[in-house]
């Protein structure tokens, strides 16, 4: 499932926040400290999500336009993508896509579509919150 939202921020500012957030998550694992130059297509790490181990694999990383990753656990697989298309130096269209699959299932089901729909709504809320934070940061 996917959606596109127009944000009133610069694409580079938005991608920088995404990169910083990813680095925080990776570095919180404590094994090694990574720099922005370490992140790219093929980069992977393992994190804990609740009681589960989740392997994160970066499928695409084209700064500042595309972030695509696969999250795999023993129960399911989620692929997410953020495509940033600048409209101007102050506006960007963000296309968010999520594909959710239970392990062993290749096709979408009613339940997986509900999970995807909920995730898309959460992503839109998160993107709007990031937009507000960037705007507040630039106005101060």
Image (cartoon, helix red, strand yellow):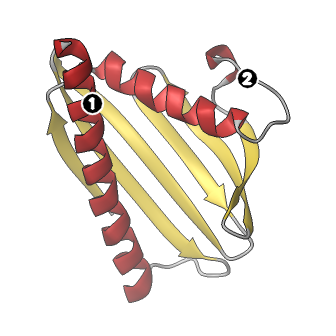
Label 1 neighbour load within 10 Å: few <14, some 14-19, many 20+: few
Q: Determine the residue located farthest toward the front in the rendered image.
A: 140
Q: Is residue 62 left or right of residue 13?
A: right
Label 2 neighbour load within 10 Å: few <14, some 14-19, many 20+: few
Q: Position of residue 14 (x, y in %)?
A: 34, 26
Q: Which mark is residue 133?
A: 1
Q: Which of marks 2 and 1 is in front?
A: 1
Q: Which mark is residue 58?
A: none
For the question of whether residue 62 can be seen, the reply is yes
Position of the N terminus, as image quadrant, is bottom left
Q: Determine the residue located farthest toward the bottom in the rendered image.
A: 110
Mark 2 or 1, nearer chain start: 2
Per the image, the residue denoted by label 2 is 34
Distance CA(mark 2)–CA(mark 1): 25 Å
Q: In this view, does 74 lie above or below 1?
A: below
Q: Is residue 109 above or below residue 82?
A: below
Q: Position of residue 102 (x, y in %)?
A: 59, 78
Helix, strand or loop under label 2: loop
Q: Is residue 104 above or below residue 47?
A: below
Residue drawn at x 37%, y 87% as measured from the top left:
110
Q: Which of 139 and 92 is in front in this view?
A: 139
């Amino acid at each position: 499932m996917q959606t596109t939202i127009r944000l009133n921020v610069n694409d580079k500012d938005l991608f920088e926040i995404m990169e910083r957030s990813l680095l925080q998550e990776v570095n919180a694992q404590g094994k090694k400290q990574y720099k922005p130059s370490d992140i790219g297509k093929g980069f992977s790490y393992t994190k804990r999500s609740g009681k589960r181990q989740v392997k994160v694999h970066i499928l695409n990383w084209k700064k500042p336009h595309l972030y695509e990753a696969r999250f795999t656990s023993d129960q399911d697989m989620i692929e997410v993508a953020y495509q940033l298309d600048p409209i101007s130096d102050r506006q960007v269209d963000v296309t968010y896509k999520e594909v959710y699959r239970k392990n062993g299932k290749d096709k979408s089901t009613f339940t997986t579509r509900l999970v995807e729909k909920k995730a898309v709504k959460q992503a839109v809320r998160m993107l709007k919150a990031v937009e507000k934070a960037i705007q507040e940061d630039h106005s101060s």
